[in-house]
Image (cartoon, rainbow, N blue to C red):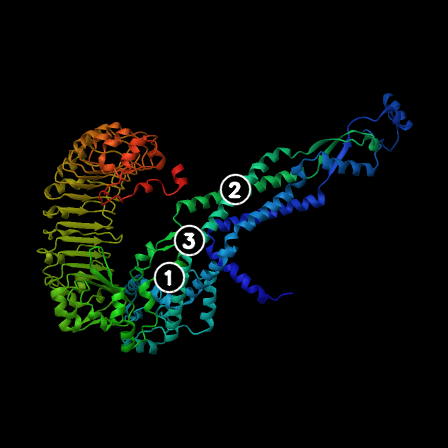
Amino acid sequence: MFSLSELAPLNQHQDQCKLLKPWWEVFMDYLGVLMLMTSVLACTEQLSRDKLLCIPLDPLPSTTRSPTDNMGHITSQQPATPTPSVTSQPQGRRTHLVYQQYVYISQVCYHDALPFCSRFFPYMALMQTLVLVASGSFWLHFPHTSARIEHFLTILSKCCESPWTSQVLSHTAQQETAQDKNVSNQNAPPHSLLYLPSMNFIRHVSIDSGTGSPLLKRAESISTTVPPSPCPSTCFLSTQTPPSNMAELEQDPQHDISLDKNDGEQARALFEKVHKFRSHSESSSVIYKVYLAQTVFKLLLVVLIGSYTIPLLSSFSFTHSCEVEEQALVGYSSFQCVHVLSSLLRKLLLAYMSLLGVYGLLNLYTLGWILHSALRQYSFHSLKDVSSLKDVPDLRNDLAFLLHMLDQYDPLLVERLSVFLSPPSESRPGEEGMGEEDLERCWGEEQLRHLVTADTEGCSRLALVALPRIPPALYKLSHLHVLRLEFITDARFSGQLSNMASLRELHLYHCSAAIAPDALSILQDRLEVLHLTFTQPSQLPEWVLSLRSLRQLHLSGRLHSEGVVARSWPLGSLRHLHDLRVLVIRGMLQRVPGELCDLVGSLVRLEIHNEGTRLLAQTGLKGLVGLTELLLQDCQLERLPSALTALSNLHSLDLQHNKLRSLEELIGLAQLRHLSNLRLAYNHIVTIPPCISLLQSLEVLDLSNNQLYSLSPSLFSLQGLHKLILSGNLLRQLPVEVRTLQLLTKLDISGNRLESLPSELFSGCLKLRELNASYNYLHSLPKEVGALTQVCRLDLRSNSLEELPCELVQCSGLYGGGLLVEDWLFFSLPPQVRDLLSQSSSPPKSDTFPYFCPTQWSFHSALESDI
């Protein structure tokens, strides 16, 4: 006997392994149970009810007939006369077989006449189902993989329970939470606004979702019995807070709650475990290989089962003929038999094969997912968009594969684990309560220099996240160019800022920075780029308005029509920013602030990312006559703003991600003599009006991802075009007038419905350097393509091409990887042409297409190549 406590670890292990099972694995588990139940039912019926019932076919010999039979035979020949007898005579032919003879014949015919599948199908189905069920979880229990998987699940469980995880994730959700709270506070009556503006960390329910996960059950049970750790992520204001406590908190503006020392030490130990497991699991890919082999084995087993089971359907018959050699024992040689369970077994076999077919399709889908996805590489693309998790490294091999599987279950669990994979987060646990000496010891000059990175331009960068204050050693980094501060509780710049002679760019992410007067004078003379991310306009520091040397200002936060520029920054507040040339606003404006006209003498670039809020009033643009670049994205614009006609110096206009349907207002842009770059991608444009021919100064035109079915001939009157982007539309034909664009160097027509390309394209656009015609229905490529001697990038992937013209050898710019086609299509060229196109050369530079070496010409997987 064994106790329930001995079964608890097994049950817990099974629950944790569910985290690594995607939906198709769970579906296949249920299908395995159904197939197992079907085979068990067939076996039960086979053992309890299966039998044959047989009767003889040939008549009895005359010597063996009894007198009674002869009398009956004579009687049957006489005319039937009605008799008054009450009892009726037996009907049919008498066989003179006793019960034991019937049993004997049934057993003999069961083994001789009944087909093999009718006798052994239930047992075969049971055995092969057991093999499928066992192979479904083989990768979780294989000796070389189970230990690594259990270690991973244990670390993941501790990461989910750690208070430090909740704290870091609460930082990333603070902006959204505070914005939602700000909206509710504005709609509520003044007497009901009970909130703490000094709280730096607010819990967001969506970040801690996924509590149904087996890993989080233990954390929930602990939270109900043990007092919560003083973690900022667990601090939220209840509506039942006593008024006295509310008053105390409001009177203490520096009120903050931090992790205790024990939590910090536990987090450091967990960081060490994660690093050791990462170095161990990234050294090999045994889990990935076992899972791939398991999937291939199950797919081959399903094909094998189906190959010999489907032909057996026709062998299930209700009647069977049986020839018996032991005629001396029974007196008959031929019998007609019926199989009692034939109909039931046939139905069970059909049900079993249907379940097996779905099981095989799921395995085929799994194999396609494995081959198509780079499961041995994992990149935190979505998490890197969050400021505090930008330094999460890319993973590979088994750790990457486990994260891919975990991502199929719940991406929030991957997000929790990523906290302990970020290098800047490693030194932060338990720092909120440290003193000045502890801060200097943990964040000395050597530690800070170790965190400094360099970008592609050679500028040194440093990011500090979730510190109680600025480390004094920071001022010793005299060569630092870019400083990023995120969630700093007390960000105070002292006069020692003068030591940072190279500082030119500053990022403040939810930091209310205070600056000493002597430090402010230094920033006024040196700072050129400032990024501010905030939740409420009141969080913007006032000293920003005095940065007279500022050249770029980036504002990201909730802005309304009466927002930061109109209310918190009164009229004339921007006049001191004499050198401001770039202004980027990411918010929810309803109008373009007219106060921006104060920057008319210096502002040359304005970007408004409106996050889906409709920009109702654009008259504020009329005063910005010095603008050369204007970007209005996600502003829900349905027409071109009429205020654009006043921007006579405009060179670039970007109206992507709006709702433009008609371009009839383009006639007003004819006054913009310097407009050379027009981007209207990701709109709902259906047709191109003839008035587009008035924009003769255009050099770049982007109409991608719209709803264009055809191209107006007026478009090809823009003979000064250098780049034309028409990808992601519904074009079925490219007009021959394209030959008039003789200065065209880049043409992107990918993602359309083109079946052919006009030969005039290659004879007229001789300066073409980049041509992207991928993802169309092209059947052939004209031989005139050889005239494009300057082309250095030709993308023909995902078309219906059967061969390539040999004239491609004349395109010397394609040598060394400039031709992007499928592998099999490239090998259809003659060997001499292939050798020339494969010659190594310096890769041509392109701002749109990445460079691929010849080994990367094929698709990501063999399955995609076959398609």
Residue at 46% x, 67% y is 220
> Residue 755 — which label?
none
Task: Quadrant for residue 491, please give it.
Answer: bottom left
141 or 347, which lies in front?
A: 141
- Rounded to the nearest whole Å, what is the CA distance between mark 1 and mark 2? 42 Å
Q: Which residue is mark 2?
A: 300
Task: Say what secondary structure mark 2 lies in.
Answer: helix
Q: Disc 1 vs disc 2: which is toward the camera?
A: 2
Q: Which residue is mark 3?
A: 401
Q: Which residue is mark 1?
A: 207
Task: Say what secondary structure mark 1 lies in.
Answer: loop
21 or 865, which lies in front?
A: 865
Query: Which quarter of the image is occupied by the N terminus?
Result: bottom right
305 or 550, which lies in front?
A: 305
Q: Earlier in the sequence, mark 1 or mark 2?
A: 1
Residue at 55% x, 47% y is 132
Residue 38 at least partly seen: no
